[in-house]
Amino acid sequence: SEKARKKRNQHPESYLWETEAGNEWARLLFFATIYHFGFECGVGADKLSDYFKLIRMDTHIGSSPSTVLRQLQKMEGLLPEFQALCENQLESTKRESVVAMDETFFGDFLILVLMDLRSGYLILESVATNRCFDTWFTHVEPRLKDLGIHVNHAVTDRAKALIKLAMTGFKCESGADIFHAQQDVVRWLGASLGRRLSNAEKQLTAASEPEDIALAEQNIASRKESKLQYHENLQGLSEDLHPFSLLNNQPQTEDKLLDKLEKRVCCFEGIAKQQAIPDANDTAKKLRNQIPPLAVNVTSWWLWVNETLQALKVYAILQTWVIDALLPVVYWHHQLHKTQNRQLREKYQQAWKSSSAVLRQHPLTDALSVCKLQHWLTWAEWMVQHFHRSSSAVEGRNGSLSKMYHNGRGISESRLKALTVIHNYGLKRRDGTTAAQRFFEQDSPDLFSWILDEMGELPLPRQARPKVTLDPLKLLGVPA
């Protein structure tokens, strides 16, 4: 009615919301705000309601906290339907996967997480009562079967149930996670070395006698040297654990890897002994026990490469060219654009340049047709993308959920399912692809566009209750 319209049009921009285009844009703004801030950022209904009042849309849109909460709940129920719809439309095919699995606790709330590491697709993110092997397998097996996934390799934090899940459930090798191995070393030596250096610098400042000054300077030099060795060997753990040597681009064998990693552990022990740092948690022993499963990440990948080439019936000269010339170039190029560490990037770039020179000089490179070269380049990129040695992507996901949980609202099982769908189909990398596009290697409908179509019309503003001012001096009449 005209009276209602006048009541709504209280602001200069109000006329816009009365037009068809303006109403459609208001609908887009309303549901995009709920989707992005309500789900991706964990903002509550009260704050979202306040936001709509700040931008003066509450006269045209129902934006009370209870109304916003109902819209959040409706969207929360629709999101899992979208993933089920997309997965049901997939072609039945075998999908090779390298996975990482972990569990995370939020109070008594236990979540099991299984992620494909190449794409970042969350195959499983489910609430469970415990984390034993039987529980894991009960949750995981149907998902692998429905999606046609064959797990070729698994990276774990060495929990017994996860090792058993990989070797018994997936029937594949279980590699140790380098992220946790480095973290253990940092906890053992990192802070202790920093404190000792800081104490030595304080002693130098307080020293007045020449002998005390000389002793303090000697301590500072010794501790700086130990700290430098610590950082070199900590980064060296990462530099050693590659399919190819950074020094000569040659394929790394199991014996070479075991020898390199053992030397790193010995260096850590030497630093601890020199600086009198106790190993109360037997970190050196734990790290030494992880050397073989760390090397498994590399050896199992090489086994996969060789088995694939044998299945393709590649002749000997071409196989040598693929392994010694092509794969190193593709691998170091991938690592070069993946790492954010400046020092590692320089080393990877040098390895890429030297391997590129070998590829150009190889006689088979010019002999192959452009079509054949592109075929093997695509295959090499696919293989390189399936080499993984860390479960840090899963740890990052757990950290993201932890931030929302500690925001004050917690995480319900229904909210977790919705967040899983947003992770798989909503979040995009710099190249514009979602985890689902990378994992299934095909396009899927746009998540937010689908949600926008399903959410229906905008909620209408309700009649506000009249404001009542209480008078403490006014007594209500009561029967005698």
Image (cartoon, rainbow, N blue to C red):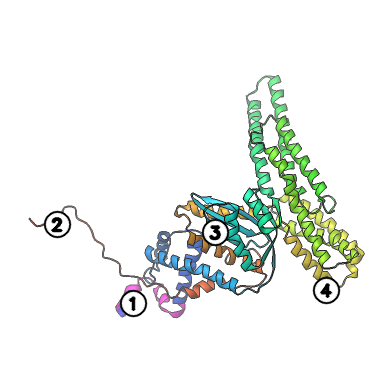
Mark 2 vs mark 3: give the one in front: 3
Mark 2 vs mark 1: give the one in front: 2
Q: Position of residue 439 (x, y in %)?
A: 66, 66
Q: Position of residue 133 (x, y in %)?
A: 60, 53
Identify which amino acid the numbered label 2 is placed on. Answer: Leu
**Is label 2 in contact with label 3 (beta carbons under 8 Å)?**
no
**Is label 2 in contact with label 1 (beta carbons under 8 Å)?**
no
Q: Is residue 117 visible?
A: yes
- The circle drawn on residue 5 is 1
Q: Is residue 434 visible?
A: no
Identify which amino acid the numbered label 3 is placed on. Answer: Ser
Identify which amino acid the numbered label 4 is placed on. Answer: Cys
Residue 81 inside the magenta-drawn segment: no
What residue is pinned by disc 2?
476
- The circle drawn on residue 371 is 4
Range covered by the magenta-colored residues: 3-21
| Quarter occupied by the N terminus | bottom left
Mark 2 vs mark 4: give the one in front: 4
Mark 3 vs mark 4: give the one in front: 3
